Image (tube, grey):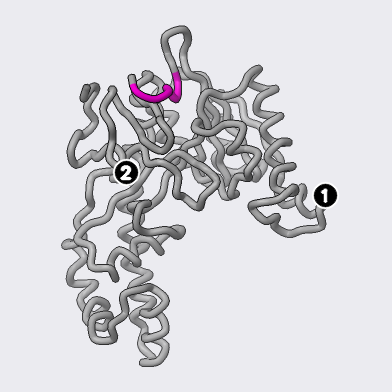
Amino acid sequence: MTGELVFDPSSRTMIYACGVSGSGTNYDRIYEGDPQKKHLVFSNVPGCKGMQKAWSYGVQAVSLDSSIYFREMSGLERAPRHGIERNSFDMAIMTLVEQTMGSQPDLICLAGYDLWIGDWMVSRYYPRILNVHPADATKYVGLGWIPTAKAILAGEKSVKSTVFFVDQSDDGGPILIQSASLPLSQWDNQLRDVRGFAEKTGSETLKDFREATEREGNNLYESLKMVSSEIQEILKTEGDWKIYPFAVHELIAKGRVALDGRTVYIDGMKMPPEGWQVDTYGFAHNIG
């Protein structure tokens, strides 16, 4: 196979760690993909619902409160992503992870983990860190509903979610897989006024659209936010929750994924920059 395997299953079964900070719904889907696979949950929010779910499954979970850590250690409410404070926290929590597991995890899944990870963590584990983005990560950045809103204003006909390898960029690491496209046509009625206003005012970006609505004194920005949030919730179910478990258990754990620089190979086939497309391959067991 071209490139270097992310995980080689020839001698042992993959073990992984999941980072959570909130409800743990992404973790739920990953866990359900293979409940028998050994793993650990870690969190910067002790006692969050994600940790509670791990305990209910009989899974080990460790935590280190990032708010207290940054405030007490550095006098900061929130540490910058790049710098000694963030690296120090990452070192501390991953020491807990590795000591509890007895080794480095073969894969780290950020599953609703609300901290940007620092340079030290990327350097130690890349390319063994995955995250999911609620949009086509090659085009639309941002959190929550914002990427969907950007896609709508750009005139996209559909949206999709992305699982990618985390590097030192802002959600710009090599893409592993993108979900099936979710057509936006079912929201045409709800978006008619938004699209019409965007066209009339020449608003192609979210910033332009918001400024235009403020000048006109209308509530179309809130309408866009509401519809985008609804779409994002459906995309989470139809996109994130399908491709993340598949990426972990069917692609990486089975030794199907290799990297050569930023180029991803699956089953020996070179993937495009957008990664494995569910629209093309579905959830096939082999495409080589």
What residue did someone put label 2 on? Answer: 273
- Residue 175 percent coordinates (x, y): 37, 41
- Residue 219 percent coordinates (x, y): 36, 83
- Residue 67 percent coordinates (x, y): 72, 52
Q: Quadrant of the C terminus?
A: top left
Identify the residue at horizontal 33%, vertical 75% (top origin). 223
Mark 1 vs mark 2, CA separation in Å: 40 Å
Residue 42 appears in which quarter of the rendering? top right
Does residue 26 belong to the magenta stretch? no
> Does residue 268 appear left or right of residue 34 in this picture?
left
Name the foreground residue: 245 vs 122: 122
Residues marked 1 and 2 touching at CB (< 8 Å): no
Q: Quadrant of the N terminus?
A: top left
Circle 2 — which element? loop
Q: Amino acid at mark 2?
A: Pro
Circle 1 — which element? helix
Determine which of the numbered discs, if any, sits on residue 73 in the image. Answer: 1
Identify the residue at horizontal 76%, vertical 51% (top origin). 70
Identify the residue at horizontal 44%, vertical 40% (top origin). 26
- Of badges 1 and 2, nearer the viewer stands 2
Please report the bounds of the magenta region as a residue range.
2-7
Specify few, some or many for label 1: CA neighbours under 10 Å numbering under 14, 14-19, or 20 or more: few
Name the foreground residue: 166 vs 135: 166
Majority secondary structure of magenta residues: loop
Identify the residue at the far top of this view: 11
Identify the residue at the far bottom of this view: 216
Specify few, some or many for label 2: CA neighbours under 10 Å numbering under 14, 14-19, or 20 or more: some
> Does residue 173 appear left or right of residue 235 in this picture?
right
- Residue 76 percent coordinates (x, y): 76, 58
Identify the residue at horizontal 43%, vertical 35% (top origin). 261
Q: Amino acid at mark 1?
A: Met
First in sequence: mark 1 or mark 2? 1
